[in-house]
Image: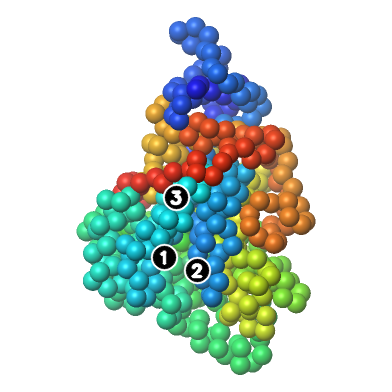
Amino acid sequence: MTTLITNGTVVSATGSVRADVLVDGETIAAVLAPGTSALGPITADTVIDAAGKYVIPGGIDAHTHMQMPFGGTEASDTFETGTRAAAWGGTTTIVDFVVQAHGQRVQDQVQLWHDKAAGNCAVDYAFHQIIGEVNDASLAAMDELIDEGITSFKLFMAYPGVFLSSDGQILQAMQKAAGNGSLIMMHAENGSAIDVLVQQALARGETSPYYHGVTRPWQTEQEATHRAVMLADITGAPLYVVHVSAKQALARIAEARNAGQNVFGETCPQYLYLSLEDNLGAPGFEGAKWVCSTPLRSRAEGHQDDLWRYIRTGDVTTVSTDHCPFCMKDQKELGIGNFAKIPNGIGSVEHRMDLLYQGVKDGRISLEKWVDVCCTTPARMFGLYGRKGVIAPGADADIVVYDPNGHTSIGLGKTHHMNMDYSAWEGYEIDGHVDVVLSRGTVVKDETGYVGHKGHGRFVKRSLSQNLV
Ligand code: URP
Ligand code: ZN
Ligand code: ZN
């Protein structure tokens, strides 16, 4: 089965060219000058006309939580519904987090995640490992998992009693990563300080979702980021700080990078567009829709312009979603009268490519930067590059035909395809549209909608990170 995507502009992280893309089976066979071939006219079983459209590598969302147990409930997207929504939005690979909590064996949890995902996914998937309890067994598992294609490990400086690791435990895990070449991912918030601020706020009767943001001030993020950077420096481990929302934390990451340290920043669409005042501060309990950690920051403090700037400078290396959806009914509602009981998370896996493309339209980032942070650098960062994140012969044919003159309304009500009873993005209008999505050569989304099937998506073993300072 061959497919020719013709007349389009192929956009990579480094430039844009008019070219045709020939797909043979699951992989890209050739990238050709438009309409030409030394061997004569190109024929294919299927031709996709991409005139006036961009042809880009499929998106890689390097931070998702499908069916994740959290706060007494479970993230509402299954691997089936979440990867289907990803396909709708031009994301053809997700990297989801296996969770090891206290008392659990890492290997058992990996098996559990394989059981949840296998046979259910619309697009390809890979795993990171959360180490919720650093001990001899989990440190040993960090070596074993590399052979199983899980090459990055998330630690928490937040959530005392649940996931939080002490500085000593973090140091040990970083020593392990420095030795075996894996990547440490860090949730950088000072959880102990936050817990005190939360208890004090609740005692004052400050119980609404707005106080979730107020009790996690930027200083708690900057302080933890600084500590993580220093611990990484002691050990020589590369460090990837996840879901950064405070400009001060990013300044610390940029400083470390300028000093030559292997430190990387990830941000998410919610931190680029949404805010403490406009969203967490919505009337009544409405703000619960946007409770996530790190929290949405104050618009008045001016974080968003800096976040976009750090994308341009390369200090934010990737934009992922931290997709961790919960419905309002029965899930977010657990925190009525106590914001600390609202399950943390926002769902965006369907909208990341569009929301970042809007940044191109708004003059915030270049077309190439869009592809870089959404597709190519996530592949390099997480050991997928070559197969994923690039349109080149031999790569998996994960391809998106994107219409820069199209339009996407994230309308009021359920116009999205995530398993949520609301959208954090209701009312957003995007000046672009995902037209066609191929996952390993198979069209999974076209102008008629989703045309893929569950079980098409396969587990992808990752190599060690191709680190980039
Ligand atoms: O609010 C968030 N971020 N929920 C998901 C868990 C995490 O810390 O990434
Ligand atoms: Zn986190
Ligand atoms: Zn997360």
- Asked if 276 appears above or below 408 in the picture, the reply is below
Q: Nearer the viewer, residue 85 or 427?
A: 85
Q: Residue at x 66, y 27 (%)?
A: 52
Q: Position of residue 35 (x, y in %)?
A: 56, 14
Question: Amino acid type of disc 2?
Answer: Pro
Q: Nearer the viewer, residue 63 or 446?
A: 446
- Asked if 299 appears above or below 391 in the picture, the reply is below
Q: Quadrant of residue 186?
A: bottom left
Q: Position of residue 6 (x, y in %)?
A: 58, 21
Viewer can see residue 241: yes
- Disc number placed over residue 69 in the picture, else none: 2
Q: Secondary structure at mark 1?
A: strand
Q: Quadrant of residue 402?
A: top right
Q: Secondary structure at mark 2?
A: strand
Q: Is 55 placed left or right of 286 in the picture?
A: left
Under 8 Å from ligand 1: the CB of mark 1? no
Under 8 Å from ligand 3: the CB of mark 3? no
**Residue that carries the numbered disc 3 in the rendered image:** 118
Outermost residue toward the bottom?
203
- Asked if 287 appears above or below 111 in the picture, the reply is below
Q: Residue at x 76, y 57 (%)?
A: 413
Which of marks 1 and 3 precedes in the sequence?
1
Viewer can see residue 91: no
Question: Amino acid type of disc 3?
Answer: Ala
Which of marks 1 and 2 precedes in the sequence?
2
Q: Position of residue 98 (x, y in %)?
A: 41, 61
The image's colour scheme reads rainbow
**Residue that carries the numbered disc 1 in the rendered image:** 99
